[in-house]
Structures are given as structure tokens and as C-alpha cells.
Image (cartoon, rainbow, N blue to C red):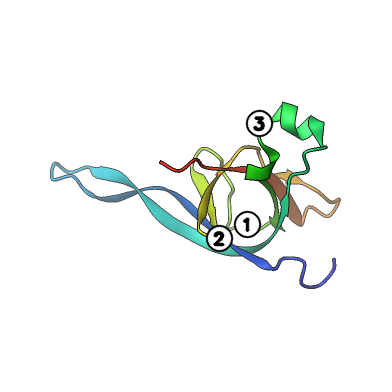
């Protein structure tokens, strides 16, 4: 593996129970889970298999994230989203292993629309 490949800092945010609701339960809120180093690339508009498989309408709003596979870092698209350079990105694909040694994973994210 080449050195300094993972040169971007990304943050994993997710839905967590933050406080009691006054009746013994917890309320769901958004909180920062963890941050890690990753390689972030743009999705090429020429890669038509990615655009049709994941329903990507605009390739300029999509990124491919490659990071080290860690035991303490589970990437669950149902629970987490990513913050990178001030924008929120929704994880659209399940993480896949990209090498035989099972040390790095890769997944696709789409920028969330501003509200």
C-alpha cells in the first residue's frame, strides 16, 4: 500500500439516543460517532455501471470513499452518514473489500441536498 493515500479526514455521524424524554425513554438525535482518515475520489460520469446500479443522477455530487477496515468502525448505511468538507453525504452502498487481504473497504456516497 502506498503511503499517504488516506489524506482526507472524514467524520461519521449517526442517530443516537441523546437524553431522556422525561418518561424514562431516550430521544433520538444526531451525534458525531467517529472520524477517520480516508481517500476520497469523485465518481466519473463515464462509469455508467455505478450510475445505474446506485441510481446516481448527478455524478458531480457523488464520491467514492476508500478507508482502512477497522474492527471498531462499522459502516452501516442505515445508521451513519458522512461529513466531509462541510457537506453531509449519504452512504449509498454497502462497504466492499477491495483487496485480497481484506484490509481496505470502499463505498459510494451522495451529497445530501440542502434544506
Residue 37, by quadrant, is bottom right
Q: Residue furthest bottom?
A: 3
Quarter in which the C terminus is drawn: top left
- Label 2, on which residue? 85
Q: How many marks?
A: 3
Q: Is residue 48 left or right of residue 7?
A: right
Residue 3 sits above or below residue 61 on the image? below
Could you tell me which residue is drawn at 59 percent across and 48 percent down?
75
Q: CA distance from mark 2 to mark 1?
A: 25 Å
Q: CA distance from mark 1 to mark 3?
A: 33 Å
Label 1 SS: loop
- Label 1, on which residue? 71
Could you tell me which residue is drawn at 83 percent across and 55 percent down?
101
- Percent position (x, y) of residue 113? 49, 40
- Percent position (x, y) of residue 40? 69, 56
Specify which label sits upstream in the sequence, 2 or 3: 3
- Label 3, on which residue? 57
Residue 24, by quadrant, is top left
Q: CA distance from mark 2 to mark 3?
A: 21 Å
Amino acid at each position: 500500500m502506498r503511503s499517504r493515500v488516506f489524506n482526507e479526514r472524514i467524520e461519521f455521524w449517526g442517530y443516537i439516543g441523546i437524553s431522556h424524554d422525561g418518561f424514562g425513554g431516550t430521544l433520538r438525535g444526531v451525534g458525531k460517532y467517529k472520524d477517520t482518515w480516508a481517500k476520497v475520489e469523485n465518481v466519473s460520469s463515464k462509469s455508467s455501471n455505478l450510475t445505474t446500479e446506485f441510481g446516481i443522477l448527478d455524478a458531480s455530487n457523488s464520491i467514492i470513499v476508500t478507508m482502512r477496515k477497522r474492527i471498531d468502525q462499522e459502516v452501516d448505511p442505515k445508521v451513519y452518514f458522512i461529513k466531509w468538507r462541510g457537506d453531509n453525504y449519504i452512504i449509498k452502498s454497502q462497504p466492499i473489500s477491495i483487496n485480497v487481504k481484506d484490509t481496505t473497504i470502499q463505498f459510494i456516497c451522495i451529497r445530501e441536498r440542502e434544506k
